[in-house]
Amino acid sequence: MFAKFLKDESGATAIEYGLIAGFISVVIIGAVATIGTEIAEIFQAISTGLTGRGDAASTT
């Protein structure tokens, strides 16, 4: 019975899949955080550019 328990690898497979899923989750979270920051900067630059153009258009 003990030898059969040692040869059973079904639990190891589940753990491996869990580790892979955890690693993929960490990579996705890191990528989204990086891309989110860059997109926020782009929108801020666009907003600043539009604000500057709006002020110049209203003075003419």
Image (tube, rainbow, N blue to C red):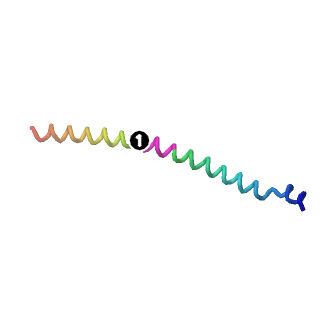
How many numbered discs?
Answer: 1
Q: Identify which residue is drawn at 51% across, 43% down.
A: 31
In the image, is residue 9 above or below residue 37?
Answer: below
Please tell me whether mark 1 sits on a helix, a strand or a loop: helix
Q: Identify which residue is drawn at 31% across, 41% down.
A: 44
User: Which of these two is toward me, 12 or 43?
Assistant: 12
Residue 15 pos. (x, y %) = 71, 54
User: Which of these two is toward me, 60 or 17?
Assistant: 17
Tell me the magenta residue range: 30-36
Q: Which residue is mark 1?
A: 37
To which quarter of the image does residue 41 belong?
Answer: top left
In the image, is residue 24 above or below residue 8?
Answer: above
Q: Identify which residue is drawn at 56% across, 46% down.
A: 26
Residue 19 pos. (x, y %) = 66, 50
User: Which of these two is toward me, 20 or 43?
Assistant: 20
Q: Amino acid at mark 1?
A: Thr
Quadrant of the frame with the C terminus: top left
Q: Is residue 34 magenta?
A: yes
* Image side of residue 53 versus residue 12, left or right: left
Q: Is residue 12 magenta?
A: no
Residue 37 pos. (x, y %) = 41, 41
Residue 8 pos. (x, y %) = 83, 58
Q: Identify which residue is drawn at 66% across, 49% down.
A: 20
* Image side of residue 38 versus residue 3, left or right: left
In the image, is residue 33 above or below residue 6?
Answer: above
* Image side of residue 13 versus residue 42, left or right: right
Quadrant of the frame with the N terminus: bottom right
* Image side of residue 29 versus residue 59, left or right: right
> Magenta stretch mostly in which secondary structure?
helix
